[in-house]
Image: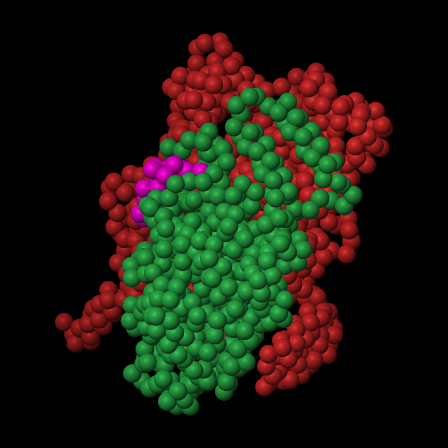
Chain colours: A green, B red
Amino acid sequence: MKEHSRPTRNRREFVADAFCGFGALALASLDAQAAVKNPLAPKPPHIPAKAKSVIFLFMAGGPSQVETFDPKPLLNKLDGQKRPAEFGEAKYQFVAPNATLLGTKRTFKKYGKSGIEVSDLFPHLSTVVDDLAVLRGCHGDMVVHSAAQYQLMTGRILPGFPNMGSWVTYGLGSESNSLPAYCVLPDPKGALEAGQPMYMQGFLPAVYQPTMLRSGAKPVLNLDLPQGITSSQRKETLDFLRGLNEAGMKPGDSEMEARIASYDLAFRMQTEAPEAFDISKETEETKALYGIGKKETDDYGRRCLLARRLVERGVRFTCVVSGGGPGNMQWDAHGDIEENHLRMAMHTDQPVTALLKDLKRRGLLDTTLVLWGGEFGRSPESQGNKGRDHHNLGFTMWMAGGGIKGGQVVGNTDAIGLRAIERPMHFRDIHTTVLNQLGLTQDALSYLHLGRRERLTEVHGEVIKEIV
Amino acid sequence: MKSSSIAILLSFVVTTQLIAETTAPLGTYTAVERRHWSFQPRQTPAVPTFTAPADKAWVKNPIDAFVLARLKQEEMAPAPEADRRTLIRRASFALLGLPPTPEEIRAFETDKSPNAWEKVVERYLASPQYGERWAQHWLDVVRYSETDGFEYDTHRNGAWRFRDYVVRSLNEDKPYDRFVMEQLAGDEMDAKAEWLRVASGLQRMGPLRKNAGNQEVASSRSEVLTEMTNIVGAAFLGVTIGCARCHDHKFDAFRQSDYYRIQAYFAATHDKDIALASEAEQAAWKAKAKATEDEIKKIKASMKGKEGDELAAIEKQLEDATDSLPAPLPALYSVENDFKRATPIHLLERGEYTRPKDKVGARPLGVLLPDGAPERETLPENPRTKLAEWVVAPENPLTARVMANRIWHWYLGRGIVATTNDFGKMGLRPTNPELLDWMANQFIAGGWKLKPMHRLLLNSSTWKQSYNSPAFEANMAKDPENKYLWHASRRRLEAEEMRDSMLAVAGRLNLKMGGPSIMVPVDKELTNLLYKPSQWAIAADKSEHDRRSVYLIAKRNLRLPMMDAFDAPDMQISCARRESSTHAPQALELTNGEFASAMADAFAARLTKEAGADPKRITERAWQLATGRSPNAKELALAAQYLSGNRPLREFALAVLNLNSFAYVE
């Protein structure tokens, strides 16, 4: 039944523009036989592509714009005062209406040829700032973690919709025949508010689900043989199984052939993937570059290095999460912005920079889009007397590589970092730009679900023209 | 005219003007919109008749007549009847979601009585496992889950009772109109009837966002009402009214005002947890909880001024303390009307609760009403009953068609309308509209009962066809999706069927019914992905881990890897039709997964016990159990060769559990 197995779909059928529509058209013209062949076979992009892969450095909890990439001298001048009325209203999760503005202790300097201002939280990153397109005018719709994380990841404020990694895999297939196409490297410190559903494939077929790469020696579930079974024994079992399945089927039965082929891929994953996850063979210089072996940077450094190894081997979309567990173990600096951001930046600054440098020297940065950011920024007002609350009206993300024109700042917030006022960019614009670099368009990358032709962007996004 | 009369008249004018200013106008619908096929009254189509003896012999009931007529139009012929062992395996999975035992198969194959098939059908329909299998279909549709989703993914006390309600309703063959009424309005029908209260827990089945801090009550309420409204369209009416939340539906005749007029029926609906414990028990619980609650207060106080790792440590303490509260007392997860807290329902610009526009009163979908049918200006005493009565009225053109079509879909793998939740313009047209109407009429005539519909299908030649057909290649080229039913479709077992069958074949299945849901052991890395890992409380009694999948907890933020891999729905939105994808993580799950490993060990032990050490006997038994047939010559030879090599029997057993013949039903 075709709509039971729709993993592959003829590109010409991606005709729709509307939300609620064109289901019957697409459904009626599907080719049932094609649908059962390898759904992860690489597929041509809709438009010429600049990037092949994406690494999303997800700063969970919401890093502060005014402590990182968006200097606001006026905020320091107004420290301790109430927000002047001309800046307008904002809704926070916790901050009381009578809260006062909080200046930052960070200092900003201009770096690189581009002279982009970066705070002293990122001494490493400031050395590669000419590769970054810093997006200061980002905004989203939600001011609580879970809903904002869903919107960042899936374009919707509710669970149940596919992550951009699933969408991209659905659109382009996999370049690797022994690794999953879409990987998430969660922070071992713990889970996030939106939980597992934010990474998932939603209503897309399970073939587009993420593979969670766990910390430790066995990153992928089910890659290890059961205890007491040797790999030669297992090889014999799988050969036996193949023989049986072939003996029980008609020649040319593509659905059964696809199932047999999935066992071949599984076996390749089992034998080849561990090599991809094994960073021990990297040079000492490379490990040192990522800060592996140093307490502060070891974990995130390992995961960034792993992300590079995955990209090298054709993995399409990798999400490397910084932050997990209780809020203060994320960038969620309600209590003390200084303590929290110094610590979180310390964990990530060197590894992130190393990733960019390493991709570049291997010639991978041109085809790898690196996206950095959280589900929102933080309030110019103080929470308590040292913390900052969530804030979705204006914050910073950045992109690098994958055809992005670095060395520029796009958009801006007002003079206290409250609201994106210049060139505001919604998550949907970020999504559209990511798709664009991969050669995908938001309308063509759609999927019929419950009578609606769903896509990553709920409302049409716009490509951020300045940076592509 | 007296001045007082003028005043009255004036006041009337003023009032109507006020209403005219603030109430959304009733939708108007063009003739073309009203003519959409699924909005038309059901026809009573004439059952096609045939003269050729072969056709007459093939047509066992009107279903066959409609199908055969359609096939003839397409110049195709039906496939021959499948053999008995194929039929019983197919029926067993369709009705019970479990494989038939070799003994059942043999008994049926050797039963010479003319009603041998009817006996099988009746036995399965009377089996308690029938309700469990069919409950899962319905639970998919209503996106049943026992947790809130979102960050806390809080477990809903007593929510599992809804699953038992569905299983029971199906097993007792409750009429579908009644089933719908109970789920929409059980609490209004009889507030004292426990199962009715459980049924209307449907209103609380959607995901629920709860956040600390400046809670926006209006926002949460708006989300809750959205969930209640959308499911009416998706589950009962088979139309995508949810699309009209933000704007008039782009393709179907649903205005935004229609959407909010349906929502108005839920304006007074609020959560209600009903304690089942006695007052004494409740008092005892409170006393027991007091120490922990005091402790929680203390910990909270100690958080002040703490930061970094120190704060994290206290947060952890707080979590532990919260987790050590005594288990909640039994309760019903339900709703009730609270008219004092009724939400005024307005059209919301772009669906945003901050942008209310005209207000609306309750009214069913306008396109199905005569022009100008008024809305209710005030909520009736039992608003959801009124809505439900409209939904299940025999004149409603959608409800019976939608359910008859679902039944068809669950049997044949594809509905007569393939888009089972979308009977609108963008859904597919019925491949056989006369058949759909006949089925829907029959459904109502049979008192909205499912079991008579099952009998019709199970006794039809249509359903009994084999997968293979003499014209296989030609027909496959013509109709690869089997829209016109020229053969039996083949399907992969669904996630729950796969797990339950592995348990059954391995001899481990625990058929205990009902009760609170079970959490089985999972990899620690998975529970670590939960915001509160301690939510995952593994059942202490290990035999509980082997219960049917419908009794495993339906938790939005943690699904078993096996369920994930085999396309189980994510419980966030209504799932009318499961995907069936094929990919490597499934193979890894079934070869290296802990569950598959445990099943392979158990299956190997069972084979040794039941078939001794003789390779041929082992092979025969393994195939009978797992695939419902004997191994063919090639398979026998391969098995003999494999087993002669002194290889572990559990690897042999594992291979059998990975056979295509095990994972697929023809």
- The main secondary structure of the magenta stretch is loop
Looking at the rendering, the stretch of residues picked out in magenta corresponds to A8-27
Residue at the location (73% across, 55% down)?
Answer: B539
x and y percent of residue B51 in the render?
Answer: 44, 10
Residue A398 seen by the camera: yes
Residue at the location (36% across, 63% down)?
Answer: A406
Q: Describe residue B271's horizontal placement relative to residue A393 as left or right.
A: right
In front of the other: A417 or B155? A417
Q: Describe residue A64's horizontal placement relative to residue B369 as left or right.
A: right
Residue at the location (67% across, 83% down)?
Answer: B298
Q: Describe residue A447's horizontal placement relative to residue B511 as left or right.
A: left
Total numbered badges shown on the rendered structure:
0
Residue A434 among those drawn in magenta: no
- Viewport quadrant of the N terminus of chain B: bottom left
In front of the other: B579 or B102? B579
Residue at the location (49% across, 9% down)?
Answer: B53
- Viewport quadrant of the C terminus of chain B: top right
x and y percent of residue B469 in the render?
Answer: 52, 17
Q: Which residue is most to the top? A: B53
Q: Is residue A45 above or below residue B219?
A: above
In front of the other: B76 or B392? B76
In front of the other: B588 or B460? B588
Q: Quadrant of residue B426?
A: top left
x and y percent of residue A417 in the render?
Answer: 37, 78
Q: Quadrant of residue B103?
A: top right
Residue B181 seen by the camera: no
